[in-house]
Image: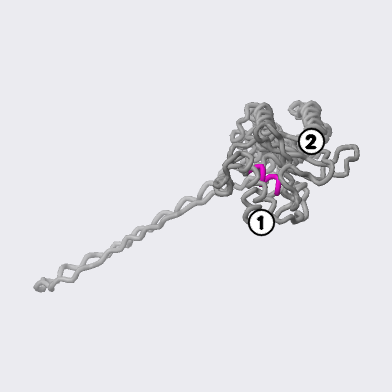
Amino acid sequence: MNRLMIMTTIVVSASIMFAGCTHPAPAPLPEPAPTPTIPAPTPAPAPEPTPGQPSEPPTYDEIVDLLSEAEAEINHMEVYLDNSRFEEARQSALDVQLTLSDVKILKSEADLTQSEEGDLELAVEYFTEIMIGLSTAIDVLEMMATGGWLTWGPYHEVLRGLNNTIDRLTSAQEMGIEIIDPGLAEGIKELDEPIETLSEAIDMLNDEDLLKAVIIYTYIDKIDPESVRDLAIEITQEATTDKKEVEELFYYVRDTIKYVKDPRSTELDFDYIQPPSQTVERKAGDCDDHAVLLASLLESIGYSTKVCFVDTDEEEPFEADHMNIIVTVDGDEYILESTCKDCKMGEYPGDMYGEEYDYAEFKAMMLEAMREGS
């Protein structure tokens, strides 16, 4: 983006107006002797303004010096990113952008050789690509530092941001290689190392174990006990035992929530997962919506739950296509299959082949992973 510098001059003109007053006429006086008329002097002509000396066009070396300022600001961006100072990094990115805009203006006014013109064009594009790439990295690193990126949508935004940064740095490197002037080329960095580091980060994010953890955490992060605590208290107010409390919550979800399929998913939303309060309001949802609501109700009044991912065809490899909840009551575990409208507490229609993840334990583990990652 070009830097736009607007200089506004305001000229204020003041007019002074005199008003006359009328008085009674005095007694007439004798006529005075006539006074000889003296012609008014002719004013001397105003001196012609002396034109200013024409300014010298900017030199190639002056423009190169200005480019070195852009390089210095990019170094500042890198330092700020290393220290998670994201607002300062954004300000440095803006300074780079403004400096490069000034370089373009000077370049248009300078008397340059074809080689100098080409080198400066490449250098401006080189620093522009790095600045845009690092600006994307600012958003990615800030998302990772503030937590919450290990759910499906933000996770893919991080991946996309890292890939975009690599693309920009790779493009910059290709431009830098073509610069002819050795003096200008001294400010052009080798970008192989940061590109390799970013590529390793992407490989880590694409690791099968981490991807699986992201999927699990996406569901578990939707469990929101506080949002349905009042409802859980109301449902269980007549219950006299722990087991009876769990039964009341199970039957509430089983009998009042209709099973409906998800809307079509998007690129960043592999599964449509409703907040538990929304499932209560709509009185409808698929298996994961049933499970998230039931786990939220149980956790809100102190019960330990596990999210269970079920492979209903029981064929290897494990591919979850269903979800329910397991709850611990008085030391015993019970399957809660609330999408089966004929099942009682602890019943499951068929042989369950699944993997279980404790809600509180897994969420604490992922939150700790986020803190370590930041």
Question: Residue drawn 63% across and 37% down?
Answer: 303
Q: Which residue is mark 1?
A: 283
The reply to whether the magenta stretch includes residue 294 is yes
Q: Position of residue 278 (x, y in %)?
A: 64, 52
Sequence-wise first label, 1 or 2: 1
Nearer to the camera, 45 or 163: 163
Residue 56 appears in which quarter of the rendering?
top right
On the picture, is 246 further left or further right than 159? left
Element on which disc 2 rests: strand
- Please, what is the dominant secondary structure of the magenta stretch? helix
Where 65 falls versus 243 (above or below)?
above
Question: Residue drawn 74% across and 41% down?
Answer: 335
Dot 2 amino acid type:
Glu
**Residue 124 appears anywhere in the view:** no
Dot 1 amino acid type:
Lys
Nearer to the camera, 171 or 53: 171
Question: Residue drawn 62% across and 55% down?
Answer: 281
Q: Which residue is mark 2?
A: 355
Q: Position of residue 298 (x, y in %)?
A: 63, 41
User: Residue lying farthest front?
Assistant: 240
Question: Residue drawn 77% across and 52% down?
Answer: 265
On the picture, is 101 further left or further right than 113? left
Element on which disc 1 rests: loop
Nearer to the camera, 220 or 61: 220
The residue range painted magenta reads 290-296
For mark 1, does the 10 Å Cα neighbourhood hold few (<14), some (14 to 19), or many (20 or more) residues? some
Q: Position of residue 32 (x, y in %)?
A: 15, 68
Q: Position of residue 359 (x, y in %)?
A: 68, 35
Cα distance between the residues tagged 1 and 2: 27 Å
Residue 144 appears in which quarter of the rendering?
top right
**Residue 201 appears anywhere in the view:** yes
State which quarter of the image contains the C terminus. top right
